[in-house]
Amino acid sequence: MLYEQKNPHGGDGYGMQIAADFSVNTNPLGPPEAVCRAVQESIGQLACYPDPFCRELTGAIAHWEGVAQENLLCGNGAAELIHSYCQALRPRRAMELAPTFCEYTASLEAVGCTVVRYPLSPDRGFALEEDVLSFLKQQAPDVLFLCHPNNPTGRLVDPVLRERIVEQCRRQGTRLFVDECFLDLSDQGREASFQPYLLDWPGLFLLKAFTKSYAMAGLRLGYGISADRALLAQMSRMVQAWNVSLPAQKAGVAALGENAYLAEARKLIVQERTYLETALREYLGARICPSQANYMLFYCDRPLYEALLEQGILIRRCANYPGLGQGWYRIAVKRPEENRLLVAALRRIAKEE
């Protein structure tokens, strides 16, 4: 648990009267019924320790991903895998984007690693562009961290640039850590994955999570894929044996049978994201980053967090992201009824001003 420090993430509505939480970017459809049933059925096994090798779960993931079980490592959420990766490698110099997910820096600094950041330009919609290659060559980090789609911007890496980044990393001996936790909910889905480069290059590590794709944040379940089995073994030594709970393992197996669920979610996200973009421009005159994911980054010069919180709506303040500042916010794309609740609140704020 956190102790004597601020929570750097969204989703902390505890102790508040929250009607809708837009600070967390999970699947707007909520957990599939099969997942809920699996968790309920696991209650009868709570006296048992969970499988320390996650045998059934890694078998299901291997089938879903088209890889061998030996290329998989499960963890207590994606965050644990980020930490164990950094603990196992202990890089001296790492590179990330700015802005991007803060857990990379936290995990890297915990092992004494220097972090250099490639700044994304708001004037270019925070898109990753070709000059990242020269920056990567100049900095020559031990590892490059990419969030794909990026958090909080929702931007995917262009396919041609994806290939060039992989080639550049391989050529100069830089490992590549790609966080694809939001990829299943992005416009392109799994088609945009870095996975085609995975099995013939041990320097690539892919991070996935049930947290976002299947709305299982409370269960804490993620996994990594790599051809570097020595790395996976070292990462495993960084955590305790029963780090993946029995309910989480059962829920993960059940979730992987829900293909239609993900397709339905992507369709809803595209539709509702457009609706929210229109409202943000109309009522706030917001500057919106063009998103390809289930969340949106935007700039507004009003004290929006406080105004929405008064109406029971929680959003993500993004001032703590390197490369952003006051006035930048992120919202999740949720179900129509929740999105309309947010838009009604925006309309009231606009009228009051």
Image (spheres, rainbow, N blue to C red):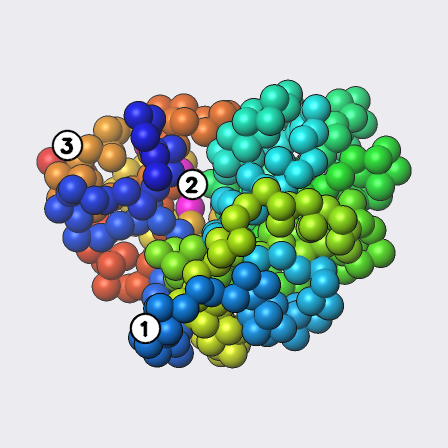
Q: Secondary structure at mark 1?
A: helix
Few, some or many residues within 10 Å of mark 3 (<14, 14–19, 20+): few
Q: Select label 1 or label 3 by which is in front.
A: 1
Q: Secondary structure at mark 3?
A: loop
Give the overall secondary structure of the magenta segment: strand
| Spatial CA span between label 2 and label 1 | 39 Å
Which residue is outermost to the right?
171
Front in this rendered view, residue 185 or 239: 239
Amino acid tagged 2: Leu
| Numbered circle sitting on residue 353 | 3
Q: Position of residue 2 (x, y in %)?
A: 34, 34
Amino acid tagged 1: Ile
Q: Residue at x 56, y 66 (%)?
A: 54
Residue 129 left/right relative to 80: right
Q: Is residue 267 in sight in this rendering?
A: no
Amino acid tagged 3: Glu
Which residue is denoted by mark 1 in the rendering? 43
Q: Which residues are magenta?
A: 296-300
Residue 264 left/right relative to 184: left
Task: Name above or below for residue 303 compared with residue 211.
Answer: above
